[in-house]
């Protein structure tokens, strides 16, 4: 910057001194630079370019040959005597690499632009089904302090129509028939950082609830008596996934282990299954009880035999997913058919023949797959997603034509659970709400006499179910 003012005596601009410039380029790391080597490389190239120009401004063929020879000799000289390798010479250097993102990190721009492309390919069409699917939820419950953690499993619906949801340090029970809300247990005495990391109802009877904690313990509660029956160890870190197979409870932890507990006996640990190298975030027993599917943050899907012991290896280790495998769902219509969903870097729903270990189909959904739920009455599967639209998608199987998209959540939809009659699905999202969707066809009364969330309060449904309630 220069000053253009003159003094009162009419002195010229020659007497005005320029102001010193304060701006400079920012060089992040000088320690990794060899300034002498870089200076020598620049001067050498300058000398070579000058020597290649003739007196009339044009390089002759002889001079060009000579210049090439000189450049070659100079390069050999620098390499042998001075120890300078031109191919590795740098003027600017960034010595420290950027830290690697966490496995659950969302690249918003990448997901946003790729999602717009995939959405054009998979347009929904309700013409694929012969029933009306409401676009709005039938009920909304507030769930304050629901943890926004992809690797946890905080929602479970029993066959006695009671919904269990873990909100930070506390487990709450919501009775879908009466609307009553009860607090079952909490881990406040374990410190401010302690939290409930997973919940799962026993399959038959619905009277017992398994609760995984951040300390690595798994608690078994008698809900009717409001009493803790036992506390089972086996993990050195939080228990993020639980799955029942009759009297066997399988737990998966951040210590990469799967532990099979026999809840009937004192020595409850039946097997420690070591097949993953990162946190286990998904567990699901097959309906026939013969196969345990496990997914983890190592992007791997493992299939285990029911008779597996601590020394056993998985029947299959499947590595087709490119991100964490949390969403697992066994088909109620076809034996040995398993659906799995991948995280942000994968975004795919894959279908497997678990008998042969072969992948049958893969569909790119365009966003993180958080949970999967089969329709028990039709060959349809519901998926819940994260950024950018945080929606639920209903797909027709096996064509995987998109039937319906359900929107309403403002953050990723982390968990889903189905009502006992299979007609209603509840979704739990990081926006701290639970939404109930009448997405599946209601069963005929002759097939199932149980009542689900869609049948609550009798004829008062339209007046009562649309209002928002609080879990606590």
Image (tube, grey):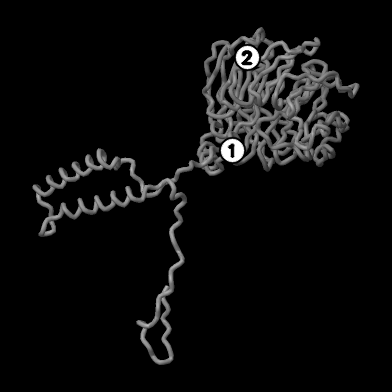
Q: Quadrant of the C terminus?
A: top right
Report helix, strand or loop for mark 1: loop
Judge whether residue 33 can be spotted in this image.
yes
Question: Left of 175 or right of it: where is 278?
Answer: left
Camera-side residue: 364 or 100? Answer: 100
First along the sequence among labels 2 and 1: 1
Element on which disc 2 rests: loop
Look at 64% across and 28% down and name the residue there: 129
| Left or right position of 66 against 446 | left
Q: Residue furthest front?
A: 81
For disc 2, the marked residue is 334
The quarter of the displayed image where residue 198 is located = top right
Viewer-closest of 73 and 462: 73
Q: Would residue 410 be found to the left or right of residue 89 on screen?
A: right
Q: Is residue 396 visible?
A: no
Tell me residue 151's x, y (percent). 66, 30
On the image, the x and y values in percent for residue 208 come to 83, 19
Nearer the observer: mark 2 or 1; the answer is 1
**Mark 1, residues whose alpha carbon is within 10 Å: few (<14), some, or many (≥20)?**
few
**Residue at x 69% of width, y 17% of height:** 259
Identify whether 319 is placed above or below 408.
above
Q: Is residue 7 above or below residue 83?
A: below
Q: Residue 165 at what x, y percent from top left? A: 78, 31
Furthest toward the bottom, the residue is: 9
Reading the image, the residue beneath label 1 is 105
Q: Rounded to the nearest whole Å, what is the CA distance between mark 2 and mark 1?
A: 35 Å
- For the point 70% across and 29% down, which residue is it? 416
């Amino acid at each position: 910057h220069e000053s253009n003012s003159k003094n009162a005596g009419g002195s010229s601009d020659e007497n005005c001194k320029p102001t010193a410039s304060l701006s400079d380029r920012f060089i992040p790391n000088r320690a990794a630079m060899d300034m002498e080597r870089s200076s020598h490389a620049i001067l050498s190239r300058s000398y070579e370019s000058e020597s290649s120009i003739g007196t009339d401004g044009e390089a002759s063929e002889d001079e060009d040959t000579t210049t090439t020879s000189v450049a070659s000799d100079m390069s050999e000289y620098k390499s042998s005597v001075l120890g300078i390798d031109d191919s590795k010479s740098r003027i600017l250097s960034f010595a420290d690499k950027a830290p690697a993102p966490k496995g659950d990190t969302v690249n918003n721009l990448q997901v946003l632009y790729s999602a717009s492309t995939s959405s054009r390919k998979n347009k929904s069409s309700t013409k694929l089904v012969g029933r009306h699917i409401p676009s709005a939820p039938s009920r909304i419950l507030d769930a304050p302090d629901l943890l926004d953690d992809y690797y946890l499993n905080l929602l479970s619906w029993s066959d006695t129509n009671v919904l269990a949801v873990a909100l930070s340090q506390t487990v709450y029970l919501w009775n879908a028939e009466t609307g009553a809300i009860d607090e079952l247990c909490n881990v406040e005495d374990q410190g401010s950082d302690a939290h409930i990391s997973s919940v799962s109802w026993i399959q038959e009877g619905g009277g017992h609830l398994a609760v995984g904690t951040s300390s690595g313990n798994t608690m078994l509660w008698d809900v009717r008596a409001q009493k803790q029956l036992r506390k089972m160890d086996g993990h050195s870190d939080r228990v993020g996934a639980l799955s029942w197979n009759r009297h066997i409870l399988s737990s998966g932890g951040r210590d990469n282990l799967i532990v099979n507990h026999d809840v009937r006996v004192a020595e409850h640990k039946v097997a420690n299954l070591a097949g993953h190298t990162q946190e286990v975030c998904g567990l699901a027993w097959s309906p026939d009880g013969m196969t345990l599917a496990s997914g983890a943050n190592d992007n791997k899907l493992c299939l285990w035999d029911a008779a597996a012991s601590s020394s056993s290896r998985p029947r299959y280790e499947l590595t087709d997913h490119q991100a964490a495998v949390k969403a697992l769902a066994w088909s109620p219509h076809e034996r040995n058919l398993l659906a799995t969903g991948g995280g942000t870097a994968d975004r795919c729903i894959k279908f497997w023949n678990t008998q042969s270990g072969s992948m049958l189909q893969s569909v790119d959904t365009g966003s993180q797959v958080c949970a999967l739920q089969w329709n028990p009455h039709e060959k349809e599967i519901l998926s819940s997603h994260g950024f950018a639209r945080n929606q639920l998608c209903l797909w027709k199987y096996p064509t995987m034509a998109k039937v319906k998209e359900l929107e309403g959540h403002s953050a990723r939809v982390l968990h889903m659970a189905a009502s006992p009659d299979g007609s209603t699905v509840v979704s739990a999202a990081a926006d701290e709400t639970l939404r109930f969707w009448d997405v599946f066809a209601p069963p005929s009364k002759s097939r199932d006499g149980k009542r689900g969330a869609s049948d609550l309060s009798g004829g008062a449904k339209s007046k009562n179910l649309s209002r928002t309630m609080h879990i606590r």
